[in-house]
Structures are given as structure tokens and as C-alpha cells.
């Protein structure tokens, strides 16, 4: 009986080789992939794509366990977990990961990108390669590329009709200096707050609004208290995607490049998927949930860009990336 099992195992291994699949006779390596967002988010879809590609391409020698809803912590805690070996794969807003690699903040200020085509050009450029080098140098992590959850707009409990209507409202922002400075320049009262506290703060009126993608507004049910969206398109969201250096080292040598390439391919696939998903979620918000979207005029859009331009300049100086900011702006033309 035992010989039969051995023979079957050899036959199965041979069959896998003939089919072009990877075969690994050792223990299976398990990677923990995490996000602070729910399973109906673009963040989680990125992890699903990564899991599929890794497990297919390694023939099951490397598998990926997925964790959503901040089970393994918020973005800063997950990034710390990458250094401790408790998190292997994650994505984070640029501003959050900038706590560990300041140069990543080049992508975080509002109105850094003017369109999806602009963003795609930048993340295929030397600017992005420079960030890869800095991440590896400062943390040992591998920066694989960028995911997204869509384009971010301002949503609120009461209707806001134009840029002037932002003056004085309490708007939840991320904790990064660029977000608070940029929204302050737009006239709002920036109110940094943990993402996990946002739903209740909107429900109780502690804050007047926040900013996020259509996907997040729908998925996190922010529309229950906020029925109004001002289409500012201030942030074509970059979610840098990482695998930890600890994780890379525990992957068998013959699979390391395969897993890293799977991560890069994940970014390409997820980006297009998430852009389309965000557009579909907008239709649901308007058609099913009764959300009203107010379009920002071209004049107001240009005003907003100009109002925050100095924040981008100051940020680039602070992180020694003035040259890279100039390259980013040139790619928008």
C-alpha cells in the first residue's frame, strides 16, 4: 500500500511537471496577506488576485491566507507587523506607509495626479523605481507596485455645492501632514481620525464629512449618514503593495522571483478592475441608495489645484524629492 502511494506521488509530480506547474517536495509556505478594509473592497480584491496568482504559479508550494477588516491591525500596525513577521503582504495608503519610508509621501497630497492615465504613467516611471529602492533600503520590504480603491471625492452629511462651501466644515482626513495641510488650504477644518472610528463619527455628527472612493463609501456604508458627494477627484488613490523582507526570505529560493512577479502582476490586474468597480459602485450609490453627486465646475477644479499646489512643493522639499515632483507634473502634460 505504501509503495502504491509513493508511485502515485511520483506520477502526480511528473504530471505537474509535464503540465508546466511548479512542484515542491518540502513544507508549504504560508503567507499572511492583510488589509484594514472589508471583503467587498478593492483592497481585498487585490489580495484575492495575489493569492490566486501565487498559488497557481507555485503549484501550491506557497499559499496565501487572507485577513480583512483590520483583524491584523490598522495600516501602521500592519506595516510594523511586516517588520516583526506577523504580516507578510499588505497594502497601505501612501501617507500611512510614509511613517516608515518618508519618500512614499510623494504620492499622498491631493491633486498629485490629474487622471488615471497620469497615475499609470508615473507608477511605470523612474519615480516609482526610486521608491522601490528606498523601501528596500529603509525597511527590507519589497514594494511591488500600486493598487487602488478608486478616485476619492468629498462626501458629507449636508450638501456642499462648490469649493467655497467647504469653508469651516469638519472633514475627517488621514493623519499625514499633507492631507491636513492640503484640506486646510481648501478652507476646511481638517480632523484627523482613525478609519475604524469614522462610521460612528459620521453617524453622531462629530464630523461633517470625509473623503473616499465610491467603493469605500458604499462598502463601509458611509452613505447611511452622508447622502451628498462633491466630485472633487482630488485623489487618484495609490495603495502601495508590499511583501516583507522576512516573507521573501522564508519562500524557497526557486519561488521567490515567481512570488514577487505575481505581486507586480497583481497590481496591474487590480488597478483596472478597481477603476471599473468604483464606477459601478457610483451607480449603486445614486440609483439604489439615493446619494446625490454634485459636479465640481472646471473653474472650481482649477482653483482647488492651485490652492494646494504649495503643499505639494513643500512636501517635495521636506522629503528631498523636488526633482521627482517635477517629473510627475511633466507627465501630466
Image: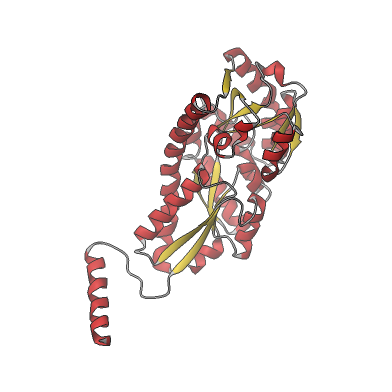
Judge left or right: residue 178 versus residue 67.
Answer: right
Placement of 35 over or under 184, stated as above or below? below
- Asked which colour scheme the image uses, the reply is secondary structure
Residue at the (66%, 55%) spot, across then down: 77
Asked whether residue 261 appears in the rendered view, the answer is: no
Q: Position of residue 223 (x, y in %)?
A: 60, 31
> Residue at 43% across / 55% down in the picture?
51
Q: How many marks?
A: 0
What residue is rendered at 57% in x and 21% in y? Answer: 293
Residue 182: x, y in percent? 70, 30
Residue nearest the viewer, comparing 189 with 215: 215
Q: Is residue 265 above or below residue 177?
A: below
Q: Split into 4 quadrants, where in the image is the N terminus?
A: bottom left
Left or right position of 83 against 126? right
Residue 236, quarter of picture: top right
The vertical placement of 116 against 136, above or below, is: above
- From the viewer's perspective, is residue 238 above or below residue 162? below
Question: Which quarter of the figure has residue 176?
Answer: top right
Residue 131 in view: yes
- State the residue in front, 310 or 258: 258
Give the percent coordinates (x, y) of residue 130: 55, 46
Q: Nearer the viewer, residue 279 or 241?
A: 279
Write the residue at 46% across / 68% down.
29
Q: Position of residue 103 (x, y in %)?
A: 63, 44
Amino acid at each position: 500500500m505504501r509503495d502504491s502511494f509513493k508511485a502515485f506521488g511520483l506520477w502526480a509530480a511528473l504530471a505537474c511537471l509535464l503540465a508546466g506547474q511548479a512542484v515542491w517536495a518540502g513544507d508549504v509556505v504560508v503567507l499572511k496577506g492583510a488589509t484594514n478594509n472589508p471583503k467587498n473592497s478593492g483592497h481585498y480584491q487585490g489580495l484575492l488576485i495575489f493569492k490566486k496568482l501565487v498559488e497557481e504559479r507555485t503549484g501550491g508550494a506557497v499559499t496565501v491566507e487572507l485577513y480583512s477588516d483590520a483583524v491584523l491591525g490598522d495600516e501602521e500596525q500592519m506595516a510594523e507587523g511586516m517588520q516583526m513577521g506577523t504580516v507578510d503582504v499588505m497594502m497601505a495608503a501612501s501617507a500611512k506607509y510614509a511613517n516608515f519610508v518618508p519618500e512614499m509621501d510623494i504620492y499622498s497630497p491631493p491633486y498629485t495626479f490629474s487622471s488615471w492615465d497620469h497615475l499609470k504613467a508615473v507608477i511605470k516611471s523612474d519615480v516609482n523605481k526610486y521608491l522601490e529602492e528606498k523601501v528596500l533600503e529603509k525597511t527590507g520590504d519589497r514594494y511591488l507596485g500600486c493598487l487602488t480603491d478608486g478616485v476619492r471625492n468629498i462626501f458629507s452629511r449636508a450638501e456642499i455645492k462648490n469649493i467655497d462651501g467647504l469653508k469651516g466644515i469638519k472633514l475627517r482626513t488621514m493623519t499625514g501632514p499633507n492631507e491636513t495641510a492640503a484640506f486646510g488650504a481648501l478652507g476646511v477644518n481638517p480632523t484627523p481620525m482613525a478609519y475604524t472610528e469614522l462610521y460612528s463619527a459620521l453617524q453622531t455628527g462629530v464630523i461633517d464629512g470625509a473623503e473616499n472612493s465610491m467603493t469605500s463609501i458604499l462598502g463601509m456604508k458611509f452613505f447611511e449618514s452622508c447622502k451628498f458627494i462633491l466630485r472633487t477627484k482630488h485623489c487618484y488613490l495609490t495603495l502601495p503593495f508590499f511583501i516583507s523582507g522576512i516573507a521573501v526570505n522564508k519562500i524557497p529560493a526557486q519561488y521567490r522571483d515567481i512570488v514577487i512577479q505575481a505581486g507586480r502582476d497583481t497590481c496591474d490586474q487590480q488597478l483596472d478592475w478597481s477603476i471599473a468597480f468604483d464606477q459601478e459602485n457610483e451607480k449603486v450609490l445614486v440609483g439604489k441608495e439615493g446619494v446625490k453627486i454634485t459636479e465640481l465646475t472646471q473653474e472650481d477644479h482649477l482653483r482647488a489645484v492651485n490652492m494646494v499646489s504649495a503643499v505639494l512643493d513643500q512636501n517635495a522639499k521636506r522629503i528631498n524629492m523636488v526633482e521627482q515632483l517635477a517629473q510627475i507634473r511633466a507627465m501630466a502634460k
